[in-house]
Image (cartoon, helix red, strand yellow):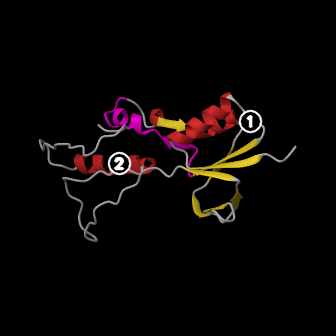
Amino acid sequence: MPPPKRLLLVGAGHAHAFVLEAFAQRPDPTISLTVVSDSPLAAYSGGVPAWLAGECTLRDTQLDIAALCQRAGARLIASPAVALCPTKHQVTLQDGHVVAFDVASLNVGATLQQPQHAENAERTLPALLAMRPLGSLHHRWQALLEDVDRLPPGTRQNVVSVGGRCGGL
C-alpha cells in the first residue's frame, strides 16, 4: 500500500473547518491531514455582531480548530506559515520548520489595507474600526472602547457600518 497523500490546510477559516468536519465524519486512511494555523481557535465572522453587541463572549464566536483536528485525526501545527514553495511542495513556518505536502489548500481569509495615519498623531474620534483580520479584532475593539470611555460625559457617538457580508452589523 502506498504512503498516504499529505493534505496540508494552511489557515483555519470556515472552509477548512468544513474539511475537518468532513474528515471527522468520514475518515480516509489514504490521506494524512495537517493543519497549519497561527491559533488553535479561529474567529467565526457570523458571530462577531453578537459579540460586539455584548450578547455573547468572544470565545462563543470562535471555532475550536484544535478539537476539530482531534476529531478528524489531523495534526495541528500552531504556527504562522511565512513562505510557500509550490515547486518543492513545502510550506515554511515562522520558526523555520518546513512542512511538506502533496496537496495544499490556502485559506488566508480577507484582509484590508487601513488608511494611513500621520505618525505620532493623537487618536481622535470618529475612529475607523477595521474588522479584519478577525483574529486580532478584540484588541482593536478594546482600544476603541477605551477611547469612547475617555469622552466627556454626555457625549454622543454614532456608529456606521460600512460593508455587510456574513459578519455585517
Q: Residue at x 19, y 52 (%)?
A: 126
* Res. 2 mark: none
Which residue shows up at 78% across the image and 37% down it? 29
Quadrant location, the N terminus:
top right
Q: Which residue is mark 2?
A: 131
Q: Is residue 71 above or below residue 145?
A: above
Q: Amino acid at mark 1?
A: Asp
Where residue 70 appears, x then y in whole percent? Answer: 68, 36
| Quadrant that contains the C terminus | top left
Residues at circles 2 and 1 in contact by the CB criterion of under 8 Å = no
Among the 4 quarters of the image, the one containing residue 28: top right
Magenta segment: does it hold 47? Answer: yes
Residue at (83, 48) in percent of width and height: 3
| Residue 103 lies in the magenta-colored region | no
Residue 35 picture location, percent across and down: 64, 47
Mark 2 vs mark 1, foreground winner is 1
Q: Which residue is mark 1?
A: 28
Nearer to me, 121 or 68: 68
Left or right: 59 in relation to 77? left
Q: Which residues are magenta?
A: 38-55
What is the three-letter code of the residue carrying label 2? Met
